[in-house]
Image (cartoon, rainbow, N blue to C red):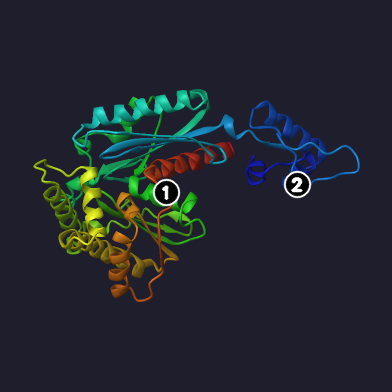
Amino acid sequence: MRAFLDAESLTVSGLRTSIGVSRPTADDVLATLLDQGFVRAAVEQPNGERSAGRPARHYEVDAEAFNVVGVDIGAHKVAVVICDLRGNTLSVRRRSVDPNLGPAGRIGAAARLMETSVRQSGTSWDRVRSVGCGITGTVTHGSEVKDIRNLPAGRDLDVYSLPGFDTIDVVAEVSARFKREVLIANDIHLAAVAEQWQGAATEARDLVYMHAGRRIGSALVIDGRIHNGRHGLAASVGAMKILGWPEAMANLDRQCRRLAGSTAAKATGEEVLALFEAAAAGNDTAVRTVDRVAEALALGASALVHAVDPDLVVLGGGLSRSGDVLAGPFQRHFAETALDAPEIRLSLLGDESVALGAARMALEDLEARMLAVPA
């Protein structure tokens, strides 16, 4: 199975060479994998292959028969990505949700979107072999999932958590509603996974990921894998009040509502976009507001960069799509504090980055279980 996963396709001779067995054994292995539905006859022969006699038949992983689902349960949206065993994206869907929605409604919205995505993607539930889910404000330690507000210094970090999620067993509630076991991880960690997998950092082994959206967050990828740390708290520099992340975001929200003349409790996505457009047009208040967010973000990035000396810094999240409006002041403040600043890149992924990272987590889980050797 590993040999087929590592190759585009294999002949029986190629399989024999890869796993070091005799021809009859290779024939038996192939027959077993065909019977299990893991491989199939290749749809196309490799380009450029020629032989004097009858060409050897090629076999390939039947990737479409093994699907994984990645889900993002966020503050303002839920999103679902379905991938096959090769990591090819089969379906991407998202839906806005009320930011004040409680756990039952929010998890239910994600479950309904997942059901719709599976039904309309052309796949089926019996092909879905693993489900991963990213949730705002969670930290994971093995199978244990906690809400960040329940940690000693997390009481003032309401912006990083979802309403009511600090009072529930997240894994149990999500798994029950999804009707299957679900892997849970922090959403920003999964966004970093997605960038390293299919985004702006595919060639980077060590990566600092900075998230700028409705909240600021960060994550570390070390030696090609997400670094969770002892209790899933690695890169949680936002809890350091000296950086001023909550204050910067509260000021951003306040100025967005002020610019829009809104009396609502929270700024809408359209109002945030309007402030960044005003900053791009040179509005002094908007420029100062964005600069304050950029400075807070850069201080956190600098702390992480000095700790791990990465290959790359990726700036992601919804606000990163403003381009130089945020990236410009971020780079300026970052250069003022970093000893030897690495390259900074903007994310190449959209709003589905968390769901894509969750799909990658599910895919790694599926591969580990498929390749496990029975005791």
Which is in the foreground here, disc 2 or disc 1? 1
As drawn, the label of residue 310 is none
Whether residue 228 is situated above or below residue 184 in the rendered picture? below
The C terminus sits in image quarter = top right
The numbered disc on residue 20 is 2
Query: Which sits in the foreground, 253 or 371?
Result: 253
Type of amino acid under label 1? Leu
Q: Position of residue 43 (x, y in %)?
A: 70, 34
Residue positioned 38% across, 44% down in the render = 354
The picture places residue 42, in percent across and down from the top left corner, at 71, 35
The local crowd at label 2, few if under 14, some if 14 to 19, many if 20 or more residues have their Cα within 10 Å, is few
- Is 311 situated above or below 249? below
Of mark 2 and mark 1, the one earlier in the sequence is 2
**Residue pictured at 34% horizontal, 52% vertical:** 321
Type of amino acid at the residue the image marks with label 2:
Gly
Q: CA distance from mark 2 to mark 1?
A: 41 Å
- What is the residue that sits farthest to the front in this orientation? 281
**Looking at the image, how many numbered discs can be counted on the residues?**
2
Residue 375 visible? The answer is no
Residue density around tag 1, few if under 14, some if 14–19, many if 20 or more, within 10 Å: some
Q: Is residue 225 left or right of residue 159?
A: right
Q: Secondary structure at mark 2?
A: loop
Looking at the picture, does residue 143 appear above or below residue 320?
above
- Locate the N terminus and report the quarter of the image it occupies: top right
- Residue located at (17% from left, 63% from top): 284
Q: Nearer the viewer, residue 20 or 81?
A: 81
The residue tagged 1 is 349
Image-based side of 31 in relation to 82, left or right: right
Residue sitting at the far left: 263
